[in-house]
Amino acid sequence: MDLRALGHSPEEFERELLSNLYYQRGTTIESASRRDVYEALAVTVRDRLAARRARTAAAHYQANPRWVYYLSAEYMLGRQLWQNLLYTGTEDLARSVRADFDEIAELDVEPGLGNGGLGRLAACLLDSLATLDVPAVGYGIRYDLGIFRQTFVDGAQVELPDDWAFEGNPWEFRAPDDREVVGFYGTVFPTDGPTRRRRWEPAETVLGEPSHMLVPGYGTATVNIVRLWRARAARGSFDLTRFARGEYADAVQEVVRSENISKVLYPDDSTESGRELRLKQQYFLVSCSLRDIIRRFRLRNSDWGVFADKTTIQLNDTHPVLAIPELIRILVDEYELDWDRAWDITRRTFGYTCHTLLPEALETWPVAMLGRLLPRHLEIIYAINEDFLRELEQRYPGDADRVRHMSLIQEEPERRIRMAHLAVVGAHAVNGVAELHSRLLAETTLRDFAELWPAKFHNVTNGITPRRFLRIANPSLSDLITEALGSESWLTDLEQLKGLEPFADDPGFRERWRQIKRHNKTRLGTDPDALTDVIIKRFHEYKRQMLKLLHVITMYQRIRDGVTQPPRTVVFSGKAAPGYWAAKEVIRLINAVAGVVNADPLVAPYLTVLFPPDYNVTLAELIIPAADLSEQISLAGKEASGTGNMKLTLNGALTIGTLDGANIEIRDRVGAENFFLFGLDAAQAAELQHGNYQPRGYYERDAELHGAIDAIATGAFSRGDTGAFAGLLATLLGRDDYLTLADYRSYVDTQDLVNKAWLDPDEWSRMSVLNTARSGFFSADRTVTEYCQRIWHTDPVSVP
Ligand code: 26Q
């Protein structure tokens, strides 16, 4: 039953809005501030989804379906207002509310509860799950402070706190009744039960208080939720004895300590591992979410025998892998199931997605730390390992090396838990995120496991939501596509973009296509005539922003030498982890080079270098539609998949890229003739890295490379200070771990082909149309469909 079936006429919408303004903000449309209107508008739009949410909950309760639970430490949801206006069909109504609508919409804050690709993937998958009517809940942490805000001071990155909900968050519903209690530390006692049953008495408890945001599907009544946990001190944490003694600050110490757990998102940083607070966050997420999942299971079911039939839990990387020992603990210690039964249920419940190949990025935790914080979980991990190692010894008698490599415990130089091994052993399915990545996982990083259990290993190539990254980000192009295809159904069936292929040969269509790019460049504030060349992603050495920068310097030097080129705007954007020195030095150098290049009147007609700070989903939505050239230049074999590459292709950018991650699948689909390929492949890169790689040799033999590096070294971008970037150059010439110098010549020569292609606008537009037309595969709807078929074995439930 709809308690409030909200009307859809303009009059009804306006009445709702005015009512919300009046009763929630205490004002009228004439005297309301922009914030008043924003808040009232958000609530008006949100309420339109509430009725759908109620219907969804009722239909799901009725169906008692198999649920998909997505556990992720990160969600990069992006702004909610535009999305919810689109999904409720109220865009035009909202626009007519007041003349300053655009300024009002700017007040919508993006919750930056993630670092980059992994968090944005989680958000795209939730969008597609709802769109495909799959009963699903996303679980995460409601960090008070999201990913830091980036500013530049003298070109260097400076981090500021992201207090994203400072003004409140109108999209969020609190659910204090569903609070959970989470234990830490303490003591494990024996019991009279079976050998492996224990009683854990935590020494510290913290409350997890949930709130949720709505996750509407597009073109369907389904509205799922993402449930985010926030840590609160348990009642009685306030120390009255100390308060009475006048020690006011000390009296709240315990409260502060508890609430710190959800205070801040950790920036992805390979050097900063082993922080106890991070481990606490992970267990906090896992413990609250599992209790919630079990509570929901028991609303409709009483037999543990069907738990794994009604529940599938997907682990987004190793961050939530403690869910495996936690489920066993709950089943064995609390619900008194036998170990073997609990283990069987657990294994059938979990799937694990791996997002990396870099061995140094595989998470491990010191045994000593985990044993102190979660003594019972350490025992359970030991017990799992004991059974697992016994299985291995039977299977590979005498092969002690193999057993040691596969153990859940690493012994040297310090005893640590290998979270990826725990995930592979405790899950029924393991997947990589692009074909190459899944193959390399099975051949290298997790080879021994893939040999033992080949059927466990899958590939599910990542995808992106076309609703946000085409329809919302690029309305002009969406309108043209809809006009050409004759309907909007491509938005939920992206392979229909194939129907644009014939238009690639239509000069009139190509002209309109070009005009839209120009319009989007103007919207971004860049030269509409210049080739817009974008590299927008987290800063990491393997992603090789430095290679792009060497090309920028080479272009600069050629122009200075009188060799001109078609006008180009190079756009860098992205954040570096605060403790990642090499990545931050690259940022500082880019800003230094931009300063010199942009100030040189001789160069200005041909080259501009921009670095807008604080890259996030909102900025991505502005840059991507304006891009002509997508830079996907990671060293082959290092980028698991990439998803920015897909967003740019979908918006008609041509890619210059290596044979890495999903680039390979993009090239296969758009056609090699519509893709600028360069560089070593993964096998060649591995061979060079394992041989005797001498980066200095490339520098000595290539005059242009020599010139670019010398310009940095002699202070051309640092007012003559020759030491300013000495450390960075020493790394580049000494180790060059990601073979930047080895790929330089191939990259620069391929960029020359890009320039040549750009000189023929009609041919460029033809290729651009074909890139969009052939990118349907990269819809997250396809990704979710594959997860459902191969891993989750779930069916949709339609909502009336
Ligand atoms: C680890 C330890 C301590 C603190 C933070 C972290 C941490 C946080 C985030 C480690 C890794 C991440 C995020 C990784 C990530 O975004 N990986 C990307 O995932 C995308 C989605 O599958 C892929 O497309 C990218 O290729 C991959 O780099």
Image (cartoon, rainbow, N blue to C red):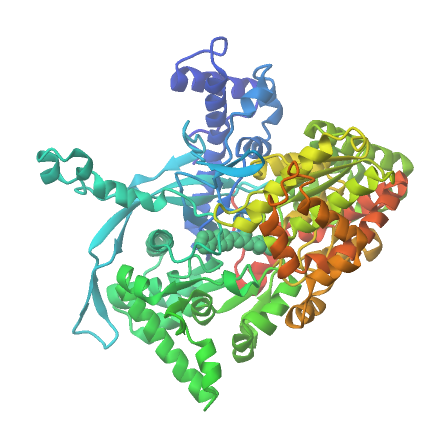
Residue at point 45%, 81% (across, down): 403
136 and 606: which one is in front?
A: 606
Residue 279 versus residue 303 in the image, above or below:
above
209 and 613: which one is in front?
A: 613
**Residue 615 image point, x, y percent:** 58, 38
Residue at point 75%, 55% (across, down): 744
414 and 227: which one is in front?
A: 414
Say whether residue 314 is visible.
yes
Say whether residue 397 is visible.
no
Instruction: State how many labels appear.
Output: 0
| Residue furthest top in the image | 30
**Residue 670 image point, x, y percent:** 78, 53
Residue 429 versus residue 243 in the image, above or below:
below
**Could you tell whether 40 is left or right of 753 in the image?**
left
Residue 564 versus residue 421 in the image, above or below:
above
Quarter containing the N terminus:
top left
Can you tell which quarter of the image residue 209 is in? top left
Residue 60 versus residue 680 in the image, above or below:
above
**Residue 142 image point, x, y percent:** 40, 42
**Could you tell whether 678 is left or right of 350 in the image?**
right
**Residue 758 image point, x, y percent:** 85, 42
Can you tell which quarter of the image residue 92 is in? top right
Residue at point 55%, 79% (across, down): 451
